[in-house]
């Protein structure tokens, strides 16, 4: 009874390499397939070990770091200590920044965002007009109130003006935060 060999892809999985690496090994003569094109894994493993050079130090390190899988959701640190970020990390950061920038642009176009200095100036203008309206109120209303109450108009005007200024001073101590 004849034992069937493995396909190139199955042998690549058995070996832990890509099928391209197996094809290259066959073309280079490092391993020999059977007559039907299949591969005897025991014989091919012996031939691979005998006919292949040991990987260089950098190649080993790349292979080791390529097989390490990080848990989902955790940040990846540079696999090699290169003193900086890897190209993949730099590209990832670049894409994240682009996405955030596009999100802000879209929100601004939709009218969901406003210009901060413009908003601060608008709030300041509204507060100032509100303050001015309150400061002018005692002069407008004091004469009418005095006649209804039967008191001196000037005395009521001064009393209302003092009360309004005290109240505005209390409101002025409140500092709105716009950050």
Image (cartoon, grey):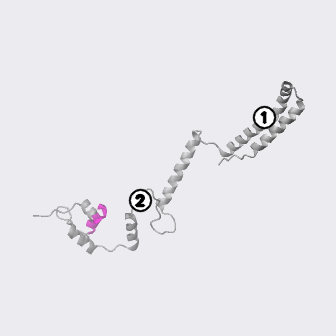
**The furthest residue to the left:** 1
* Of residues 48 and 173, the one drawn nearer to the viewer in this rendering: 173
Residue 35 is situated, as x and y percent measured from the top left of the image, at 16, 64
Which residue corresponds to the image point at 38% horizontal and 70% vertical from the top-left? Answer: 60
Left or right: where 32 falls relative to 109: left
Residue 38 is situated, as x and y percent measured from the top left of the image, at 20, 62
Dot 1 surroundings within 10 Å: few (below 14), some, or many (20 or more)? few
- The image quarter containing residue 167 is top right
Which residue corresponds to the image point at 54% horizontal and 46% vertical from the top-left? Answer: 103
The verdict on residue 36 being magenta is: no
Residue 18 is situated, as x and y percent measured from the top left of the image, at 31, 62
Left or right: where 143 falls relative to 6: right
Callout 1: SS? helix
Q: What secondary structure prevails in the magenta region?
A: helix
The disc label shown at residue 71, or none: 2
Which residue corresponds to the image point at 50% horizontal and 59% vertical from the top-left? Answer: 90
Rendered position, 141 above or below 14: above
Left or right: where 23 falls relative to 56: left
The disc label shown at residue 34, or none: none
Foreground: disc 1 or disc 2: 1
Dot 2 surroundings within 10 Å: few (below 14), some, or many (20 or more)? few
The disc label shown at residue 133, or none: 1
- The image quarter containing residue 5 is bottom left
Q: Which part of the image, by quadrant, shows the N terminus?
A: bottom left
Which residue corresponds to the image point at 85% horizontal and 36% vertical from the top-left? Answer: 159
- The image quarter containing residue 142 is top right
The verdict on residue 27 being magenta is: yes
Q: Earlier in the sequence, mark 1 or mark 2?
A: 2
Q: CA–CA distance between discs 1 and 2?
A: 62 Å
Residue 128 is situated, as x and y percent measured from the top left of the image, at 76, 39
* Of residues 152 and 165, the one drawn nearer to the viewer in this rendering: 152
Q: Which residues are magenta?
A: 15-28
């Amino acid at each position: 009874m004849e034992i069937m060999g493995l396909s190139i892809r199955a042998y690549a999985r058995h070996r832990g390499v890509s099928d391209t690496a197996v094809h290259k090994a066959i073309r280079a003569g490092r391993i020999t397939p059977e007559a039907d094109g299949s591969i005897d894994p025991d014989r091919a493993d012996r031939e691979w070990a005998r006919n292949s050079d040991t990987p260089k130090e950098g190649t080993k390190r790349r292979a080791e770091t390529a097989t390490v899988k990080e848990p989902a959701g955790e940040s990846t640190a540079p696999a090699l200590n290169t003193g900086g970020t890897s190209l993949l990390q730099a590209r990832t950061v670049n894409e994240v920044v682009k996405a955030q920038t596009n999100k802000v642009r879209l929100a601004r176009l939709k009218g969901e965002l406003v210009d901060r200095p413009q908003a601060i100036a608008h709030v300041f203008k509204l507060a100032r007009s509100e303050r001015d309206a309150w400061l002018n109120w005692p002069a407008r209303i004091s004469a009418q109130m005095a006649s209804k109450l039967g008191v001196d108009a000037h005395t009521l005007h001064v009393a209302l003006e003092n009360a309004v200024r005290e109240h505005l001073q209390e409101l002025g101590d409140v500092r709105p935060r716009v950050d």
